[in-house]
Amino acid sequence: MKRFQVKVCGNNNVENFKALTLIEPDYVGFIFYDKSKRFVQDELLFNIFPNAEKVGVFVNETIQNIIQKVIDYKLDVVQLHGDETAEFCEELISTKHQCLLTDENFLDFKIWKAIGIKNKDDFQQLTAYQQVVDSFVFDTKSDDYGGTGRKFEWELLTNYQLSTTFLLSGGIKLEDALVLKNFQHPRCIGFDINSGFESEPGIKKIEEVKQFIDTIDGRIEQN
């Protein structure tokens, strides 16, 4: 059985984040979108070094600002959660390569593109992105740029036939862990969790996150 990865997104509280790092998710996400309830304001958060890859979430941000955040916070992944086009992603890659060539201290990063899903037609736009992103994040389609806290119909993923990998997001809760442990799609590499594991925006229920990760990893069975 393959191992799924887990990203815990929307971290913005120092003490809560310290507790989260102890259970070692694969990815930790920070939202750099000032209209989000989980917007990162306390830079002390980045004095904590998790045993996890750091994901910066951006919404319609400039390439210059994205690159600066990568440099400042040593981000491993840039997640684009707005209206960014394939051409934008291509320009971001070009800028990244230029930085790698000119700055020996610049660290490489992956690019993820979040895509809102409501029906099978939403997969038709993805072909243009498959050469310029490392993975997709499939979330529930919304009229704004934040997460909805709701699931979309996961059966729709049978319509996704490209080779690019993806993470599943949108309304995932602890009760979904056993189903997701056995989730069947050859391109799914993991799950992106956020509001379904919070007591309030930015404050994760650490024990529930741990149970979810342990269940996904097969270390415990949910009743």
Image (cartoon, helix red, strand yellow):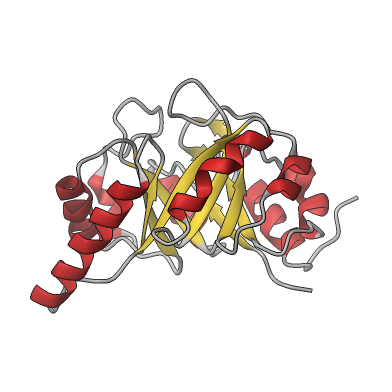
- Determine the residue positioned at 45% across, 62% down: 134
The picture places residue 172, in percent across and down from the top left corner, at 67, 40
Above or below 170: residue 128: below
In the figure, is residue 40 to the left or right of 105?
Answer: right
Q: Is residue 178 left or right of residue 196?
A: right
Among all residues in the image, which is located at the extreme right?
223
Q: Position of residue 217 (x, y in %)?
A: 72, 67
Whether residue 147 appears in this view of the structure is yes
Task: From the viewer's perspective, tell me whether residue 55 is left or right of residue 19.
Answer: left
Judged from this view, the residue extending furthest toward the bottom is 104
Please identify the quadrant where the N terminus is shown: bottom right
Quarter of image, res 120:
top right
Give x and y (percent) for residue 123.
60, 42
Q: Residue at x 37, y 34 (%)?
A: 83
Given residues 21 and 82, the one toward you in this image is 82
| 110, 33: nearer the viewer | 110
Q: Residue at x 57, y 42 (%)?
A: 124
Where residue 63 appears, x then y in whole percent? 20, 48
Number of callouts: 0
In this view, the residue in front, 71 or 78, is: 78
> 39 or 179: nearer the eye?
179
Which quadrant of the structure image shows residue 117?
top right
